[in-house]
Amino acid sequence: MYSDKYWEKEEIIPKKELEEIQMKRMRWVVRNAYENVPFYRRKFKEAGITPEDIKRKEDFCKLPFTVKEDLRENYPFGLFARKKEELVRIHTSSGTSGKPKVVGYTREDLENWINQVARCLYMVGCRKNDVFQNMVSYNFFTGGLGFHYAAERIGAMVIPSGTGNTERQIQCMLDFGTTIVHATPSYALHIKEVAEGMCIDPSDLGLRIGCFGAEPWSENTRKRLEDAFGIKAFDSYGLSEMNGPGVAFECEEQNGLHIWVDHYFIEIIDPETLEPLGEGEKGELVLTPLTKEALPLIRYRTGDITLLLEDEKCSCGRTHPKIHRILGRSDDMVVVRGINVFPSQIENVLMRIPEVGDHFQVIIARNGTLDEITVKVESNESNERSKNSLEKEKIRQKIQKELQKELNLRTNVELLDKGSLERYVLKSKRLLDLRGAL
Ligand code: DLL
């Protein structure tokens, strides 16, 4: 351990030194891909470049992009730069269609990854005497083992409770003295509800810190979680193709996520023109892992929309840049009557309305030639205590008005009783686009 405040000295090295490390690693990663992955050798040839052409940072944009389809088409191990016998683990990530993406790790890759996630956990205050309850899936998903080994490395006591069986999760918190939880934000909201159903005030569970991620969530959801559990809630970002969790994480400022640029080279591009965008411009995040031996993905298009925040010195002392919380995925963004809408925008509006419960669903359908958005949203009251229909109609109209203000779009709002919508233990599915299904 480096000091009381930081897990690794690399978190605070001067920017200039960071850039030098990046350049050195970039050249290594390009060579690793070119020499060991026939797919990249072919792509480089097609682009008319060799690893020797990559000398400076500016040269990097000559390199071809890698997309999710490339992983699927080369299923299972076609993009690996190491032989199977050198790998010590694989994970998979299933999308909405086709074959899952398979990602692999050498021993060195795992070492790096564990330290990256440990960096994140240490940054938000996880220490040796903490009890860390890991409420995400351990099956194939990177979130389970990724956090598990990192919390162990710090020396915290890990409860590998996985997903589901919510009442038992709550009992574990009480019996074992959990201080830090890790879950998707939507599952955390569900835990809150189940605890209340067990007549337990979530703030009496004794939790201190929540690490939430793996799906988009909003500032207002953070507020709800922090208020209900009496915790500090931190946003955690990552993706299987870049090891898993641990790519970017909030620090105590809770104002943007530090992205570890000694391990990832980052770019933000316009997803339509593929042109690079500058600081403060919203676009698609493109990542190149700089230390991964087994799977050197070059300029990987994540599909995630964010922006690079202004390069001010963070009060936590870390020198790594920050990105805005993920606004949504480019394939989650729906264009309705010419207007771009992200489900996370809708979430942010709903979660600031006190009469609204924690769960909602967005349905897009075509009515004749016109696209319609329906927002099904639960009230914060249970069936028995429901308001009369006049009061309900007033709330419904209020929600509709707030959404219209934010989205510039009229939506149909249906106010449902608490408990009407499906609950998810891992990633929630809040957007249902029925337009293609017609
Ligand atoms: O979700 C890795 C992870 C595990 C991250 C645990 C955080 C915590 P995948 O299943 O491959 O990996 O999904 C990656 O999830 O491209 C984003 O679209 C989305 N995502 C992940 N974290 C966030 C976040 C893991 N904090 C995909 N906010 C990514 C918004 C997120 N979206």
Image (cartoon, grey):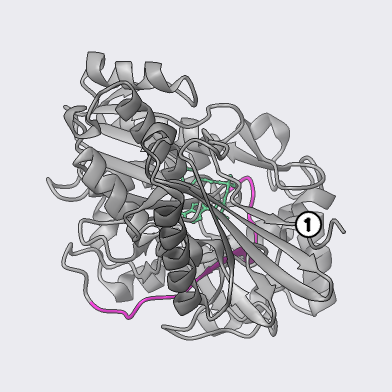
Residue at the spot 35% in from the left edge and 60% down from the top edge: 353
Residue 262 visible in the shown view: no
Quadrant of residue 228 within the rendered picture: top left
Seen in the picture, residue 170 relative to 356 is either above or below; the reply is above
Question: Is residue 200 left or right of 405 when viewed as pictured?
Answer: left
Q: Position of residue 291 (x, y in %)?
A: 51, 53
Seen in the picture, residue 242 relative to 424 is either above or below; the reply is below
| Between 111 and 66, the one nearer to me in the picture | 66
Residue 242 colored in magenta in the image: no
Farthest left residue? 4
Seen in the picture, residue 286 relative to 211 is either above or below; the reply is below
The magenta-colored residue range is: 293-312
Which residue is under mark 1? Answer: 69
Q: Position of residue 191 (x, y in %)?
A: 38, 32
Residue at the spot 30% in from the left edge and 41% down from the top edge: 210
Residue 216 visible in the shown view: yes
Quadrant of residue 320 within the rendered picture: bottom left
Seen in the picture, residue 128 relative to 256 is either above or below; the reply is above
Question: Is residue 283 left or right of 62 when viewed as pictured?
Answer: left
Quadrant of residue 438 within the rendered picture: bottom right
Q: Residues within 10 Å of mark 1 (few under 14, many from 20)?
A: few
- Secondary structure under badge 1? helix
| Between 421 and 146, the one nearer to me in the picture | 421
Question: Is residue 75 left or right of 259 when viewed as pictured?
Answer: right
Decide whether the magenta segment is chiefly helix, strand or loop. Answer: loop
Q: Position of residue 420 (x, y in %)?
A: 54, 38
Residue at the spot 59% in from the left edge and 60% down from the top edge: 29
